[in-house]
Image (cartoon, coloured by chain):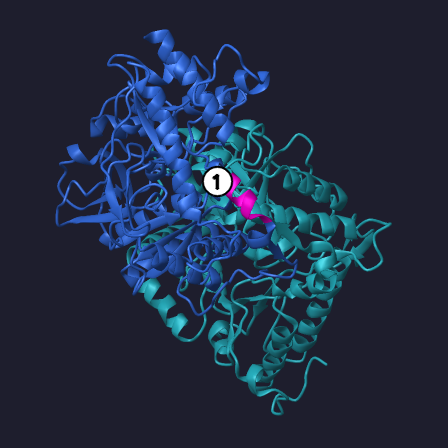
Chain colours: A cyan, B blue
Amino acid sequence: SVSPAPDEPTDHRPSDSIINLDHGDPTMYESYWKVVGQKYTSITIPGFQSLSYFANKKNMCWFLEPKLEEEIKRLHKIVGNAIVENRHIVVGTGSSQLILAALYALSDPLNEPNPISVVSAAPYYSVSPDQSSSNCCFHLEIYVYTKLKSEVNFAKIANFTVMGQTVSSAESYPETTDFLRSGLFKWSGDARCFNKEGPYIEMVTYPNNPDGVIREPVVNRADGKLIHDLAYYWPQYTAITSPADHDIILFTVSKCTGHAGSRIGWALVRNENIARKMVKFIEINTIGVSKEAQLRAANILETVSLSCQRHKPRDLENFFECSQRLMAERWKKLREVVDNTELFFVPKFPIQFCNFTRDFTETYPAFAWLKCKEGMDCEKLLEGHKILTRSGRRFGSGAEYVRISMLSRDEEFDLFLQRLLVVGDNNN
Amino acid sequence: SVSPAPDEPTDHRPSDSIINLDHGDPTMYESYWKVVGQKYTSITIPGFQSLSYFANKKNMCWFLEPKLEEEIKRLHKIVGNAIVENRHIVVGTGSSQLILAALYALSDPLNEPNPISVVSAAPYYSVSPDQSSSNCCFHLEIYVYTKLKSEVNFAKIANFTVMGQTVSSAESYPETTDFLRSGLFKWSGDARCFNKEGPYIEMVTYPNNPDGVIREPVVNRADGKLIHDLAYYWPQYTAITSPADHDIILFTVSKCTGHAGSRIGWALVRNENIARKMVKFIEINTIGVSKEAQLRAANILETVSLSCQRHKPRDLENFFECSQRLMAERWKKLREVVDNTELFFVPKFPIQFCNFTRDFTETYPAFAWLKCKEGMDCEKLLEGHKILTRSGRRFGSGAEYVRISMLSRDEEFDLFLQRLLVVGDNNN
């Protein structure tokens, strides 16, 4: 049941503990992989394997394991969420490295004297611990620089650490863009208020993190370049309506299968020179990508593909069906709790036909974009009940919003709902 | 024998093939790990393991696997090459990422309006495909910028690819420092001709890549910060004379055990705030480091430590004794060939007492710094015999020098020596 009596905790340890739904740690997926178990997904790597820097000297992306390339292509074809024909695949140490690689590849050849502007429509993917609530592009820029130049930010993190919580402050477009104060590109805030002349790069995400809305580019000028971050364009989160077909598309195993610890992402790149520059970036940044992680990711993707076959093994449940069911249940439970209060609101999403499941489906975002009554600070309110979330202010939106991870373990998610119900009752 | 008759090749395939000794791919170590085999070094990772971004929420370096931390400390204590007490360990995606992390951590808090100068004594670790032969700091700076802004460099790489050779262009201080045109730091060339006022960062490597010489900092001013790159400070390469004790020390499994494909390096950092900033960098850059690679590296280091025990298993040869013997043999063979010609020269190194082996030993660098007669272009000369090396020009030295990897597989190394003898005979 969603709402056990919160005054009668059956277990003292979890009911007292801090629930961290701030970062999107995809531990929800552990349950599927535990059931599938050693039979399909164990990988053994002998000590003499993969000593070389090289995985495939004949490939432009010389550090990409051929087996991973094969499994990426196979899965996209099965799911139908992206076109892989005539695309270059670039593997990265998670999609954060690929974002930087793409920014480098797009901005370096422009030969501009000033850094290229990087924009994204608010609310965008962000994390800076206490970013200004202003939506204004200029303020945000200044703020990011100031933060990087002061110790305030790091003192804050120390603070969190004392509380027993480490905050993953990455996963942020503004911070990722600006942390080295590159002369090639710089963060310029909300795409909707971007009006600077000249070339720019727009990050487009769909379904969008944090609010789950399907997004198109908003600036739409001839001198713009696009990077499509489709981390969540998988059947458990949203209807697959057509295969994505853009210049640069980013994916990551973290959000597809839940293996965030592997740090494996990939880009589908149309233009060969752009792909070559992205490879160059990863070469200089980390001299390639861990072979062990690639081999394991290949094995995991292979199992996912196998689970989608009509004549699959009986003991291997379809990964996307199972995950979609989990997401649907969690969203249903969350909506029940939210509807029980007059304090909270969550967005509604349209129902669409999914070409993969051959059925109509809602969108079930990996993050809930929860809204309080106007004037309330939702992050603070929930923090008072030991629920750590990420304030809407950090995404270029208001303090009445928070972003909540929907991908925690079952016991954490249920405890979160129990507490949310208490917060609602106390404030009704 | 070192010098089989080169006119009578016993195998047509290798004698015709290109030998790439340009990058330091440590495939020499495969033979040891094949013998040690599955018994000691196989690692199995089930599908449900390491899904989380986090490895240890209680550690400041929250993505560091506790087992890897333990094995790093144990090995340093056994070998005696670095002090680990009261040091923070930061794991990175290879030491290239840790170099950037350290540059970020040292330069960001200085709050300087202009980028901090980064220097290293020539010949330094470098790779830019056709760097100017000038030693002058200013020229080098301009060159790196120019290279990054033009397509020339990438056209070059395409060229190599057509030849069936992919060139790893990373592993370069100048390139690593400047590729994003950071506002925080920039490459300023040879430390010996550095005379700019104000703060600076000096990269110190020992034994030095490429020339194998033990190095001290050369600028030595109060406003300088040091990063010690001790990738080769292991018993197979040099005498361990005392445990290194510096502010920031970098190591990598690539050069220690040969597992370059894993992309695992670590830093020993004295100051907590510097360590925290390095962690921050890796968080933003790649949101941590692959768990699979860390777990495997931990397993490999554990085996190396076990092999050093007095009461070790009989079938597990001491890793460092075995590797040192291999290096000593290769250097002996190389010196025999070089002494047979009047064309080539290799440096001589002093004999020192090694505290680890409890014996006197020479230095056996991972790269040979080969010199031709004055006025000759050594890289071109060897390329004519299908031996790819890296010109001294790329390290801030002259065209009569090349850097040659000593860590290739046995058959490649022997073939290289055969051809070198032919080159010598033809030019005597």
Q: Residue at x 60, y 50 (%)?
A: B38
Spot the residue most to the right.
A311
Magenta residue span: B31-37
Q: Chain of mark 1?
A: B
Q: Nearer the viewer, residue A115 or A345?
A: A115
Q: Quadrant of residue B276?
A: bottom left
Amino acid type of the residue that numbered disc 1 sits on in the rendered structure:
Tyr
Question: In which quadrant is the C terminus of chain A drawn?
Answer: bottom right
Q: Is residue A26 above or below residue B343?
A: below
| Visible residue check, residue B115 | no
* Residue A388 horizontal/vertical position (percent): 50, 72
Q: Nearer the viewer, residue B244 or B97?
A: B244
Q: Which residue is mark 1?
A: B29
Q: Is residue A417 left or right of residue B200?
A: right
How many marks do you count on the picture?
A: 1
* Residue B251 horizontal/vertical position (percent): 36, 49
Q: Nearer the viewer, residue A398 or B201?
A: B201
| Visible residue check, residue A4 | yes
Q: Residue at x 33, y 36 (%)?
A: B364
Q: Is residue A322 above or below residue B39?
A: below
* Residue A380 horizontal/vertical position (percent): 46, 75
